[in-house]
Amino acid sequence: MEKPFILHMLTTAKNLSPFDVNMAVDAGWVTALPYINVEPSEVQGLVQDAIFSRSTKNLKKTGIFIGGRDTKQAMDMLKTAKRSMVPPFEVSVFADPSGAFTTAAGMVAAVEHELITKFNTTLEGKNILALGGTGPVGQVAAVIAAQAGAKVRIIGRQLDKAQNVADLCNNEFGDGKIAITAGADADKAEYIKTADVVFATGAAGIELLSAELVAVAPQLKVAADVNAVPPAGIAGVDAFHNGTPIEGSNSGALGIGALAIGNIKYQTQNILLKNMLNSEKPIFLHFEHAFSVARDYIKSKIPA
């Protein structure tokens, strides 16, 4: 009898995201099994239960997804899962906590596309403000952009928290090869004077950048907002903006809204889940792979 595709979906939260379950099944995983309230110390046991219950041939139809709410914890669990494999008993693993990896990848790739096509430049050397950047999407977007050569500042309400998050990003996700800085929300009027790009990644329904600050930003090129709930995270940028000029911007800045970002996030997650299905060898996926896929997806949609 032909064995079905099984995706074991682990989360440290009390519920597994229905969004992720739908994505998995729609991508071709016949069965998506939730494991909730998972302790990181339990990952090895769960992984080894999965890999030793099937032949090496049928392990190609087995995968593990890591959700949760914490980016560092998800990356640590991914590393634990990889260490838990006993070749040739191995399966593919994909980490995407709260959708943060694929959402951040979609946002940064969309911004990069606008910089290239509308301003004839790249992320390299650009000054980026990650407003509300202490959360999962902000953290990962900051790391991805910094790895692409941007100068990124994470902005939070409390400077000490923003600094702790910046240190986490540099040391845990960037392997000490990037230098993300921190700033306080109270000082963003000063930071906006030299910003080329703004990411708004805070809680839904909270304005992070006012129309007044948009107007006085002298070199702002692109502003991206993941928030789909009014009011907008960036004044003048609604969910439907897709490289659309921001009303009131004196620098000619373009806006990217939640629906444009969400479409790239959706396509990226779908492709990664399918890559797990189709790979002949185990693959271990996280935000760097998500950014690569998001970039390629955007390029594939550009008219020749």
Image (tube, helix red, strand yellow):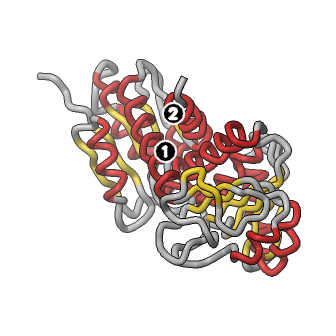
Q: Tell me which amino acid carries mark 1.
A: Ile
Q: Secondary structure at mark 1?
A: helix
The residue at the point 87 percent across, 61 percent down is 194
- Disc number at residue 264? 1
| Position in image of residue 193 (x %, y %) | 87, 66
Q: Is residue 276 above or below residue 266?
A: above
| Position in image of residue 60 (x %, y %) | 34, 24
- Disc number at residue 190? none
- Tally the numbered discs: 2
- Neighbour class for label 1 at 10 Å: few (<14), some, many (≥20)? many
Q: Is residue 74 above or below residue 80?
A: below
Please state which of residues 127 and 174 is positioned toward the viewer in this rendering. 127
- Hey, which quadrant is residue 30 in on the image? top left
Residue lying furthest left: 1
| Position in image of residue 135 (x %, y %) | 62, 66
Please state which of residues 231 and 56 is positioned toward the viewer in this rendering. 231
- Disc number at residue 297? 2
Please state which of residues 87 and 234 is positioned toward the viewer in this rendering. 234
Residue 228 visible, this angle? yes
The residue at the point 27 percent across, 35 percent down is 28
| Position in image of residue 150 (x %, y %) | 80, 47
The residue at the point 11 percent across, 22 percent down is 1
Q: Secondary structure at mark 2?
A: helix
